[in-house]
Image: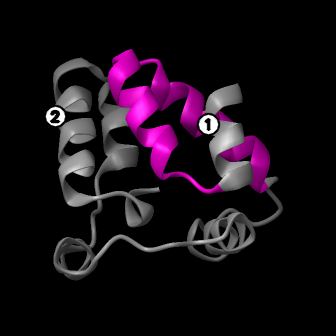
Amino acid sequence: MRDVMSNEAIDRVADELDDNAPDKVEDLWEDTNPLVSFLSHIRPNLHISPDNFLVRLRQEGNLPGADAETIIIAVFSATKDELSQERVQEVAEFLPGKISEMWQAA
């Protein structure tokens, strides 16, 4: 999700999660790979189709046999519970098509 957002928006979400979220939700937002984190901050936000978003989750999420949509909605729901309405709306503006719909429904 961070890949499609601006660095400023990523930081605003991280700040709210730092202040409000349980560690498990906050950990979902953090990029634990230092190289990937660095590269993410120097490149522009990506424009990913909803289908590619799901493919990347399946490939990078290491969740064999799990339903990607169910996982996305669960993570989105847990994340939204810890964010202000302003931040929830800001995230929705970055998400493409079906992924944005899943964010809104979570």
Magenta segment main secondary structure? helix
- Disc number lying in front (2 or 1): 1
Say if the magenta span includes residue 86: yes
Q: Position of residue 76 (x, y in %)?
A: 56, 36
Residue type (three-letter) at the residue carrying disc 1: Trp
Say if the magenta span includes residue 59: no
Please tell me which residue is depicted at 67% across the width and 50% down the height of the picture: 99
Quadrant assignment, res 21: top left
**Residue 87 versus residue 5 in the image, above or below:** above
Q: Position of residue 15 (x, y in %)?
A: 16, 34
Tag 2 residue: 15
Q: Position of residue 55 (x, y in %)?
A: 71, 74
Please tell me which residue is depicted at 69% across the width and 53% down the height of the picture: 97
**Residue 78 versus residue 13 in the image, above or below:** above
Local crowd size for mark 1, using a 10 Å CA cut-off: few (<14), some (14–19), many (≥20) = many
Please tell me which residue lies in front, 77 or 9: 9
Which quarter of the image is occupied by the C terminus?
top right
**Residue 21 versus residue 25 in the image, above or below:** above
**Which range is magenta?**
68-96
Tag 1 residue: 103
Q: Indicate which disc, 2 or 1, sits on the residue closer to the N terminus.
A: 2
